[in-house]
Image (tube, rainbow, N blue to C red):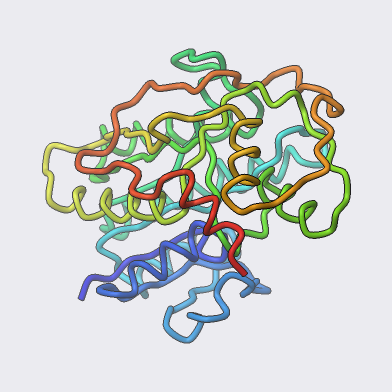
Amino acid sequence: MKRVLITGITGYIGSNLARRLLADCEVCGLVREPVNLTYLEDIQTQVRLLPCDGTIDSIASALEASRPEVVYHLAAHYTGAHGPEQTPKLMESNLMFGAYLLEAMAACGCTALVCASTIMAHYQGASYRPLNLYAATKQAFSDLLAYYTDAGPLRAVTVVLSDTYGPGDRRPKILNLVKRAVRTGEELALSSGEQDYDVVYIDDVVSAFQQAGAQLLQTQGWNNAVFQAAARNPLTLRQTVEQMLQVNGLSLRAAWGQRPQPEREIHRAVRLYPPLPGWSPAVSLEEGLRRLMEP
């Protein structure tokens, strides 16, 4: 049985990846205390949670204890807007923690890494133009990774994500806000909704990471490969919400145009990287939106 280590295992994507990998892997997770088990309640006894205080020594200890064949690095801190109070957290979580992880992996001989990045690093389709500071910190980690894969023993696959959704998601994502407003009957202020909403269902996101890890172990030519997990034909946000209501027979007090458009926003879906070989979305938007509303 393979052994894997997941950073960000307590998050929505990380916990769903853990569920998928438990079928044929021993799953370990790197966690900070106190541990938030909200997303792990049903599998907490099946995964091994290793404490980390953010120092390189604690990360190295977790790697020595788990000796994973593949590390899945999903831990991140996200905020769209930022100020002086958010900046240290962005730097600590998205850059320093990642730098310590890379150095500890190299020192411990754990050489296979699958990590997540964001299409927000490509504002207006540029090869690199960060939409916000979060995207800039994610790119900074990618720059560090380029060094470790070129000069050191690490081999990596980066999966670039746009947006993700699915049942059981407690993040303040737009479809979750719509879901809550439908159930409460409250009016929901929305933007114009004319921007593309490039979203992938959680099962397909998890499949992308699972396949990336398996292929990384089998493909010797991949040192620092980058692929994109994206929707086939994304609709606009408004079209997506309207389809969500239609397939579930719901109504929403939608105040389109009442929420100001952000000054910086990705209006059209960006396609810069190839899809992971052998991967494509298996869950249609219609089916995913139906599952989203299931109890």
Query: Can you give x and y, in whole percent of width and height, for residue 139 in the image?
Result: 50, 30
Q: Is residue 280 left or right of residue 222?
A: right
- 148 vs 252, nearest the viewer: 252
Count the numbered circles shown.
Answer: 0
Query: Can you give x and y, in whole percent of width and height, for residue 121 in the image?
Result: 53, 25
- 148 vs 259, nearest the viewer: 259
- At horizontal 37% and vertical 73% (from top left) the residue drawn is 27
In this picture, is 272 found above or below 275?
above
Picture quadrant where residue 24 is located:
bottom left
Can residue 58 be spotted in the picture?
A: no
- At horizontal 77% and vertical 45% (from top left) the residue drawn is 252
- At horizontal 70% and vertical 40% (from top left) the residue drawn is 79
Query: Can you give x and y, in whole percent of width and height, for residue 33 in the image?
Result: 65, 72
Q: Residue furthest bottom?
A: 45
Query: Can you give x and y, in whole percent of width and height, for residue 257 in the image?
Result: 81, 24
Q: Is residue 204 left or right of residue 180?
A: left
Can residue 228 be spotted in the picture?
A: yes
In which quadrant is the C terminus drawn? Answer: bottom right
Q: Is residue 202 left or right of residue 223?
A: right
- 178 vs 52, nearest the viewer: 178
- 215 vs 189, nearest the viewer: 189
Q: Is residue 284 left or right of residue 244?
A: left
- At horizontal 55% and vertical 68% (from top left) the residue drawn is 31
In this picture, is 101 found above or below 53?
above
In which quadrant is the N terminus drawn? Answer: bottom left
In this picture, is 47 found above or below 254?
below
